[in-house]
Image (cartoon, rainbow, N blue to C red):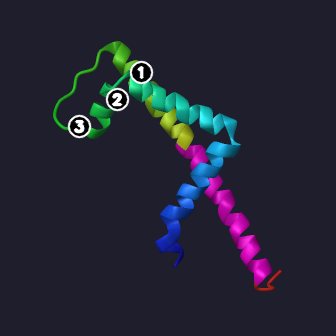
Amino acid sequence: RIADSFYEIDNDIMMDMLARDGDYAALRQELAQLQTDYPFIEKVLEGDGAITLTAEEHEIFMRNMALTGKKEDMERRQIYFRGHTDCFAYLKKIGAI
């Protein structure tokens, strides 16, 4: 049952983070703006075939990758803590603690 609900739970966690964590929201905004300002990022990530980047574009792409890694770390950490919270609530509900 949990596996079937994972994507909905995951989405709820991300929406909660956007509403409550200003650093996360700012990071998501910075990533969105970077990808809007530099459409070549999507071509590198989603396209096929050869792509050549200038030194400046490479620097921008690496910035995007670093921000993406930071965002994903924040999300994984929140999912981990949410799991602890949900587990505690469940154990309390069934009277195990």
Residue type of the residue flagged with mark 3:
Gly
- CA neighbours of label 1 inside 10 A, class few (<14), some (14 to 19), many (20+): some
Q: Main secondary structure of the magenta part?
A: helix
Residue at 34% from the left image edge and 29% from the top image edge: 41
Task: Indicate yes or no whether the magenta region holds residue 84.
Answer: yes
- CA neighbours of label 3 inside 10 A, class few (<14), some (14 to 19), many (20+): few
Residue at 30% from the left image edge and 26% from the top image edge: 40
Q: CA distance from mark 3 to mark 2?
A: 9 Å
Q: CA distance from mark 3 to mark 1?
A: 17 Å
Residue holding disc 2? 41
Residue 56: where, in percent of width, then height? 37, 14
Q: Earlier in the sequence, mark 2 or mark 1?
A: 2
Q: Residue 60, which numbered label?
A: 1
Residue 96: where, in percent of width, then height? 79, 84
Vertical side of 38 occupied by 8: above or below = below
Q: Quadrant of residue 19?
A: top right
For the residues labelled 3 and 1, say whether their Cβ atoms are less than 8 Å apart: no
Task: Indicate yes or no whether the magenta region holds residue 79.
Answer: yes
Residue type of the residue flagged with mark 1:
Ile
User: SS at mark 1?
Assistant: helix
- CA neighbours of label 2 inside 10 A, class few (<14), some (14 to 19), many (20+): many
Q: Quadrant of residue 90?
A: bottom right
User: SS at mark 3?
Assistant: loop
Vertical side of 60 occupied by 50: above or below = below
**Which of these two is toward me, 15 or 71?**
15
For the residues labelled 2 and 1, say whether their Cβ atoms are less than 8 Å apart: yes
Residue type of the residue flagged with mark 2:
Ile
Residue 1: where, in percent of width, then height? 52, 79
Q: Residue 47, which numbered label?
A: 3
Tell which residue pokes out farthest to the bottom in this image: 95
Residue at 56% from the left image edge and 63% from the top image edge: 9
